[in-house]
Amino acid sequence: MQFKEIFQHQTEWTMEQVEFFQTVKNFQTSILQQHIFDAREQNVNFDLLLMGRNFLDQEIVSIALDANPSQFIGQLLNYERNSLNFFHLLTQHHKSDDLIKKIQLLINSPELFCTSLAVKYGLIDALRSLWNRVNEEAMKSIITTEMSTIFMRHSSELIRELVLLFPAEWFVQLYDHLGNTVLHWTVLRSDLDLLQFVLRRYRMLLYSKNEFGDVPLLIAARYHEDVVVQLLLDHGADPWIEPKIIQTIVIQNRQQLLQRFPVDIGRIVAAQVDGYRNNPLRAAIKANNYELFVALHTQFRYELQKGDLLHLAARLNKVNFLRYILTELMPHNAEVYVDSISPDTSFTPLMVACATGHFDAAQLLLQR
């Protein structure tokens, strides 16, 4: 056989495959059946097409699913033993026993699989039809498993319809494998209209924490602009429920947003029991944000005695912070704190300044 003939045969085979896959994608079962009959009459091996794979290495069932998931679900849910049904044709003519067994399992109990597909592909009409056919706990489990997919892949309008489809109390109890609720995910999306919608229905989730201890307000402060944070505050989010919120605001130098926070001295002081963990005063020194540091002390009464602030300011040679701390501590026996020993390094602030070669900081400490 000449090269030209080989090339021609290969081209014809490729075109035949493309045409066949197009038939599968459109669920044109009558055409598919005709192809099978024609192949038998012409003594042509049609099995090669049935067992073929596309350039993504997908077999016939995956090709059909990706091309038209809605019709795929419809053919499974409304399975009939006739040539108009795609899955019936496959069980009758496909040569893979393994594939046929899998299809038969789906045919016998298609509801859960179809529900997962409907959620994955965002087929709200299919979900409505499945709503009364699937056990409530099973449906909850599927929504929980696919929650991240729902919020990452689908439109805000579809998410809204999905939330409205199921009982309102469902989403109060549902959370993904990392503990994120519907409100956590909505905040991550930062769609203000969708966030308003979810907040009206699930305001109580403002206080829920995921597995990392993150409340929705912390996620908003960490990843989004002020408008998202302010919307949560408007709906009653508590900025003092988690110390990392204020620390995040300080690190990002969002002083204007800080003014929106209510002053609750008792809770602020209680949150500062651990002077090191999530201490916003330390964060302000590291960020060299003097104005914010002063505001945290004067307005919110964060204590200067906690967190080895003198040691930190000396190590970083932040003379203006050192001067402020020493001045404010004067009425409270400043000399006690000037010579305090850090539990981490066993150094005094002066020793830290000298060890790091910061002459200005050392001189100021000696003067005091």
Image (tube, rainbow, N blue to C red):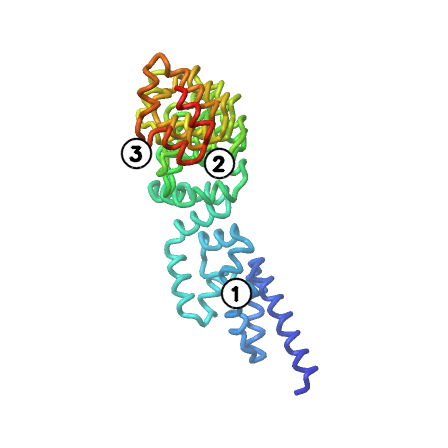
Residue 44, quarter of the rendered image: bottom right
Residue for badge 3: 346
Quadrant assignment, res 41? bottom right
The numbered dot on residue 57 is 1
**309 displayed left or right of 61:** left
Residue 209 figure quarter? top left
In which quadrant of the rendered image does the C terminus lie? top left
Instruction: Name the residue type under label 3.
Output: Ser
The residue identified by callout 2 is 188
Q: Of callouts 1 and 2, which one flags the residue occurring earlier in the amino acid sequence?
A: 1
Between the residue at mark 3 and the residue at mark 1, the CA separation in whole angstroms equals: 63 Å
Q: In percent of the image, x 51 and y 56: which residue is there?
A: 65
Q: Is residue 202 visible?
A: no
Query: Which amino acid, mark 1?
Result: Asp
Tell me the distance, in whole angstroms, between the alpha carbons under discs 3 and 2: 43 Å
Q: Residue at x 31, y 31 (%)?
A: 342
Rendered position, 104 above or below 162: below
Q: Amino acid at mark 2?
A: Leu
Residue 334 x/y as whole percent: 35, 18
| Total number of numbered discs in the rendering | 3
User: Badge 3, how many Cα within 10 Å: few under 14, some, many 20+?
Assistant: few
Where is residue 54? Give x, y as percent.
Answer: 56, 65
Which numbered disc covers residue 170?
Answer: none
